[in-house]
Image (spheres, rainbow, N blue to C red):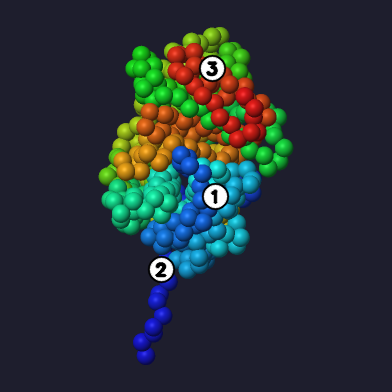
Amino acid sequence: MASNQRSIRWDRLDNTANLFPSIAGESMTNVYRISVTLKEDINPEILQEALDVVLPKFAGFNVRLRMGVFWNYFEENGKKAPKVHEENTFPCRYIRPNKNRSYLFRVTYYKNRINLEVFHVLTDGMGGINFLRELTYQYLRMSYPALAEIKGDLLSTETSLNREDSFIKNYKSSKKSGFNRQRAYLLNMEKLPHGEFGVMHGLMPVSQLKQVCHKYNVSINDYLVACFVWSVYKECYHGMPGNLPIRVAVPVNLRPYFDSVTTKNFFVMISAEFTPTKPTYTFEEVLSCVTESIKAQISKEHLEDLFSYSVSNQKNIWMRPVPLFIKNIAMKAVYSQSAVANTTTITNIGNIKVEKEYEQYIKQFYAFIPMSKGQPMKGTICSYKDTLVFSFTSVLMDTMVQRSFFRKIAADGIEVTLETNGEYYE
């Protein structure tokens, strides 16, 4: 007898995503935020309607996390979209699925800003941008009927819905681990009260940044990473020699290297490193060390080696039948080892573009990531049109590193405007 019931769709986690459920919790949420500010205040009813329309079109967001015997997996979520609400807490909080209709993301608003917060198990920054951009488009079409007549109700042709595991697809052969587990200099300073979360945004013109980077003959990303390293060197090492390297983890988007458009996670971490071994250094010397360490790791072959090690563990026939709870213990142990290997993480979301019909309604994009074990401060870069935003997130009470960072940029002739979430008053 034929069944009329529709089968429930399920999907595997990508190679990187397998780690996040084993380490995530209240103190290390692995929830990142991407926000967009519009030129008018948000109407919450329309935003909820827009989410209700967009969510079913994104299979990668319309899921819940299930625990299997050997691996976690995604299952289609048949519930209503999570409820949109006004932001009233600190950002990047842990997402409890049982209080969020089993979804692994949340949408909030504040005045003219829409916030999308995503548990990293779903996707990296590219997938988050895709979803927020389409949610914003839908919201604007519902708010301005004339815009809906021009654009219709379909997803943008630039929005990918691809859900391949590009790690598995591009895996070649087993490699030794290329990740550095040697201890780095850590920012051990007095922390904010438990649960508090400081955010500081520095807005600066891309055109001015390009001029300065051209003078130094480096990329914008390398320059900003070097400014952070310089700030830690000046404020924490006080310009003196030290034994531990200042090491910055830098996520690299692998899609351009492997011709991928997946909306699952597809990145690896490389590291920018500087160890002050002599009495004094100039900024140019620090910049040279940082740039060379990054350049030495940016090749398709090396990037492939980095993720092939992780994939080889996943594909190991001896690992497959190991129960999930044992795998989780092993993944936590490996993560704890590597957690002290970096001073911070600085991730570059890149330049966010929107279709020209929507530009007049959109003011700016922001992005930032939460803290993790051993890293009480992190940085995120994103840009829209001619404005780049460098966002610091921190649970440290002192802002000396952030102040030094922005002072260095301003000293190079770049106009910087600071914004905070109120935790820091600069």
- In the image, residue 195 sits, relative to residue 327, either above or below, namely above
What residue sits 53% from the left and 30% below the top? 201
**Is the Cβ of the residue at disc 3 closer than 8 Å to that at disc 2?**
no
Relative side of 190 to 334, left or right = right
Q: Position of residue 277 (x, y in %)?
A: 53, 15
Q: Position of residue 1 (x, y in %)?
A: 37, 90
Q: Which residue is mark 3?
A: 407
Residue at the front extreme of this rendering: 146
Q: Earlier in the sequence, mark 2 or mark 1?
A: 2
Q: Earlier in the sequence, mark 3 or mark 2?
A: 2
Spatial CA distance of label 1 from label 3 is 32 Å
Quadrant of the snapshot with the C terminus: top right
Q: Which mark is residue 108?
A: 1
Q: Which residue is mark 2?
A: 9
Spatial CA distance of label 2 from label 1 is 27 Å
Spatial CA distance of label 3 from label 2 is 52 Å
The answer to whether residue 277 of the structure is visible from this angle is yes
Q: Nearer the viewer, mark 1 or mark 3?
A: 1
